[in-house]
Amino acid sequence: MSLINPYTFIFTIINLVVLYLILRKFLFKPVTKFMEERSQKIRNSLEEADRKVHEANDLKAQYEEILKKADDEGKAIIERAEKYAREKADKIIEQANIEAKAIIDRAKEEAETEKIKAMHDLRVNLSHLIIEAASKAIGNINVDDDEIINEVVKEAGASWNK
């Protein structure tokens, strides 16, 4: 007898083929399909992640540009404010100089007016003294005589200005 029975061998082969077909139909195809779907989901997730990274980089670049523009704009505002402040300070200083010059000019005019007034008062007092001295020397001149006083002041003023 032979160790291998041909019927058993054929029956085993048929069983293996049937088992293979059943497994292929109910196990291999669904598992393969599941694995392909899972691979596709992973690929999609990776592509989505890459897309998100690119979007994030683009947004980052946009935000950096916006920040740079804001920084430049801030610097420009500060420069304008400093320029305005310098111009304002220059105008204030210029106005103060003009006012100081006007005050000095008024003070000089007032001093000149006071000088003229003092000179006039001095002349009048001097005239009174001269008239009193002359009246004591001559005797008969009235100190309150305005005409004589004005004439003496005119003559004294003419000689005083020389």
Image (cartoon, grey):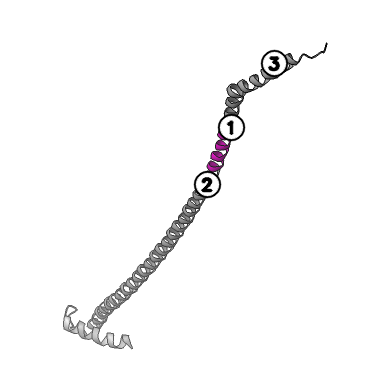
Q: Position of residue 29 (x, y in %)?
A: 59, 27
Which is nearer the eye, 71 or 111? 71
Residue at (49% x, 50% y) in the render: 62
Q: Quadrant of the N terminus?
A: top right
**Mark 1: amino acid:** Glu
- Residue 130, position as x, y percentages in the image: 26, 82
The location of residue 23, given as percent across then percent down, is 62, 21
Judge the density around disc 1: few (<14), some (14-19), many (≥20) Cα neighbours within 10 Å.
few
Q: Which residues are magenta?
A: 40-52
Q: Secondary structure at mark 3?
A: helix
Q: Which mark is residue 14?
A: none
* Nearer to me, 137 or 108: 108
Binning the other alpha carbons within 10 Å of mark 3 as few (below 14), some (14 to 19) or many (20 upward) gives few
Badge 2 marks a residue whose secondary structure is helix
Task: Check disc 3 and report the residue beneath it.
Answer: 11
First-in-chain label (1 vs 3): 3
Closer to the eye: label 1 or 3: 3
Q: Are marks 3 and 2 in contact (CB under 8 Å)?
A: no
Q: Tag 1, which secondary structure?
A: helix
Distance from disc 3 to disc 2, alpha carbons, whole Å, reads 70 Å
**Earlier sequence position, callout 3 versus callout 2:** 3
Name the residue nearer the viewer: 53 or 156: 53
Task: Give the left or right position of residue 159, taking residue 21 as reference.
Answer: left
Q: Which mark is residue 36?
A: 1
Q: Amino acid at mark 2?
A: Lys
Left or right: residue 65 compared with residue 19? left
Image position of 95 with respect to 160: above or below: above
- Amino acid tagged 3: Phe
